[in-house]
Image (cartoon, rainbow, N blue to C red):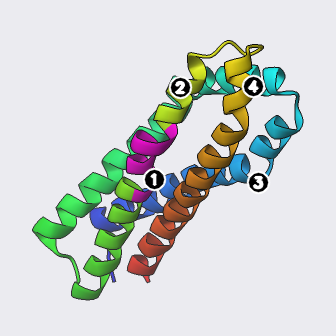
Amino acid sequence: MIDGPFAVLTVAGVLGTGLVAGVFAGFSTFVVRGLGALPPAQGVAAMQAINVAAVRPAFMALFLGSAALCAAIAAATLVVWPDEEAAVELLLGSALYLFGSFGLTVVANVPRNNALERLEPGGAEAEAYWPAYLREWTAWNHVRTVASAAAALAYVLALI
């Protein structure tokens, strides 16, 4: 069983990745559905506003802080290797978050957000792009949700 400072890092990893999973789950289960029920111009404008609000300190500290924490857990695991069994869960949790949540955000969700940001909410181009955006962005968000939740679970398993 993990104890001491390594346990504190792991508990923080559970909390960070679990909170991010919750944010992503909220988007996947009701926010995007609500936006999709709006007329396209309103949905586009609302999502553009959400994307601006998301890069404020509160969420970015949680999202980027969790990535940094996962990287620290992975590095400490490779250097210290606290327990052979726990090391697998710690490395798996870190990889799930770093690649499945943070990495996917960078390569899948942010480019879609950037493309949406360039469009005029009431324009024909935005109206044409909106259904594809919702479908693709949400599909990748489901993956980020599962990856973040699985990372939290892996960290919990490392603690027991």
Circle on res. 101:
1
Chain part drawn in magenta: 100-109
Left/right placement of residue 50 relative to residue 80 reads: right
Circle nearer the N terminus (2, 4): 2
Separation of marks 1 and 2 at Cα, in angstroms: 20 Å
Separation of marks 2 and 4 at Cα, in angstroms: 13 Å
Give percent across and percent down for residue 143: 54, 60
Count residues near mark 2 (Cα–Cα under 10 Å), then give few for <14, some for 14-19, many for 20+: few
Q: Amino acid at mark 3?
A: Thr
The kind of secondary structure element at disc 4 is: helix
Q: Residue at x 34, y 51 (%)?
A: 69
Give percent across and percent down for residue 54: 58, 29
Separation of marks 4 and 3 at Cα, in angstroms: 22 Å
Separation of marks 3 and 2 at Cα, in angstroms: 23 Å
Q: Amino acid at mark 2?
A: Ala
Q: Residue at x 67, y 54 (%)?
A: 25
